[in-house]
Amino acid sequence: MAKPVSIEVWNPNGKYRVISTKPMPGTRWINLLIEQDCRVEICTEKKTILSVEDIISLIGNKCDGVIGQLTEDWGETLFAALSRAGGKAFSNMAVGYNNVDVNAANKYGVAVGNTPGVLTETTAELAASLSLAAARRIVEADEFMRAGLYDGWLPHLFVGNLLKGQTVGVIGAGRIGSAYARMMVEGFKMNLIYYDLYQSTRLEKFVTAYGEFLKSNGEQPVYWKRASSMDEVLREADVISLHPVLDKTTYHLINKESLATMKKEAILVNCSRGPVIDEVALVEHLKQNPMFRVGLDVFEDEPFMKPGLAEMKNAVIVPHIASASKWTREGMATLAALNVLGKIKGYPIWGDSNRVEPFLNESVPPPAACPSIVNAKALGLPVSKL
Ligand SMILES: NC(=O)c1ccc[n+]([C@@H]2O[C@H](COP(=O)([O-])OP(=O)(O)OC[C@H]3O[C@@H](n4cnc5c(N)ncnc54)[C@H](O)[C@@H]3O)[C@@H](O)[C@H]2O)c1
Ligand SMILES: O=C(O)[C@H](O)CO
């Protein structure tokens, strides 16, 4: 028998029981659920990562939908428990859903939501920050100052890399990868090389137009290239940022061999998922190549780091905060709540999950649709005509 977990209850007499496994930023998501007759139960347990048993205990005997987190293991056991409790809706408060077994959800007829779009620019901005912090050795220099070691300007003190005119490589040029590429090209006048399974025509057009603009101003233009293999990006780029989904094809995409392909002074940034990099191989590479630098937001065994990583001066490391801006986190909570609410109310699925702005406009009620359900097709859910 699982131990009871502590909760906070909103609108106790609501008809539909919706659980959030964590308190989430803002109140709009709570109000939207309450207005539509939901009783909202928010888990207030102190521990950060809830176990499957904790969540089973939260679901109980009657539950219409759950908003969950990327730290939770949403597999067969939880979808079976949700289904037994009468639930047909789950949403991750995240765009990535590698913690969710979608086949298991399909088996129990549970819709799986995610939160694309609202975090694109925020996440890309952190990838750009990590690129800059690694290139200009900002964290090392900050530690040096705080340690009272600065005793005057020196020609060699914390010399780093100039980005202008260098090549930025993007692996996974989807929403976030493309936004990051634009920031680096436009902000720092870098050339672009990218690798993705699909062509990113909009990104290519943007770089071409920006290159023409620079040229017309008498400046050095920028160029783009779509690589035919990931290795081409690794060989040619000075800064490489990883933005693919995590699946079987991207697990340990960066390993001992691919690290050896990169330039000795390259910068590698990861704001996708930790297991895209073989972190043991990365630590070894950082040890052997002190001029190689990384900026990491995600780790292979989160919340842990592989031995040795924390000691590496050539690594900038932050705790999975790429989407952590107030607007984005409140928007993620709203989208996740509306995914669950929409399924409970029998609303259709929003036609374009890349265009979620209508759900985020606080001055008008959101459309009567689920913003983004990843298994909509598998479940045969209708698409909104709005
Ligand atoms: N660190 C964070 O806080 C944070 C925040 C948001 C998203 N993410 C991660 O970023 C990922 C991407 O988000 P998005 O909104 O840009 O998704 P997206 O679907 O728009 O982009 C992913 C891209 O990866 C490409 N891709 C898939 N397999 C590939 C492969 N083998 N090689 C090269 N490219 C491949 C896809 O074609 C797609 O263009 C999410 O799945 C999530 O895991 C992390
Ligand atoms: O996938 C996601 O959305 C992130 O990892 C958290 O924002």
Image (cartoon, rainbow, N blue to C red):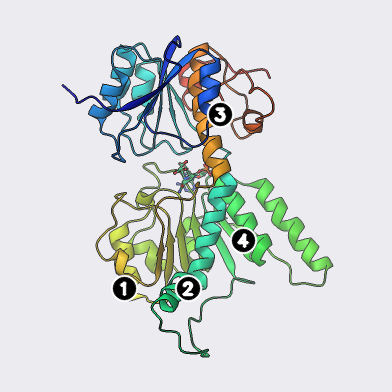
Mark seen at residue 28: 3
C-beta proximity under 8 Å, tags 3 and 1: no
Q: Which of marks 4 and 3 is nearer the N terminus?
A: 3
Q: Which residue bears the numbered disc 1?
A: 287
Which residue is nearer to you in this view: 192 or 368?
A: 368
Which residue is nearer to you in this view: 168 or 2?
A: 2
| Residue at x-position 42% and y-position 54% | 297
Compared with residue 40, is residue 313 higher up or lower down, i.e. above or below? below
Neighbor class of circle 3 (other Cα within 10 Å; few <14, some 14-19, many 20+) is some
Write down the quadrant of residue 327 in the picture. Answer: top right
Q: What element carries label 3?
A: helix
Quadrant location of the C terminus? top right
Amino acid marked by disc 4: Met
Drawn side of residue 271 relative to residue 299, left or right? right
* Image coordinates for residue 333, horizontal then vertical, percent: 50, 33
| Residue at x-position 71% and y-position 53% | 206
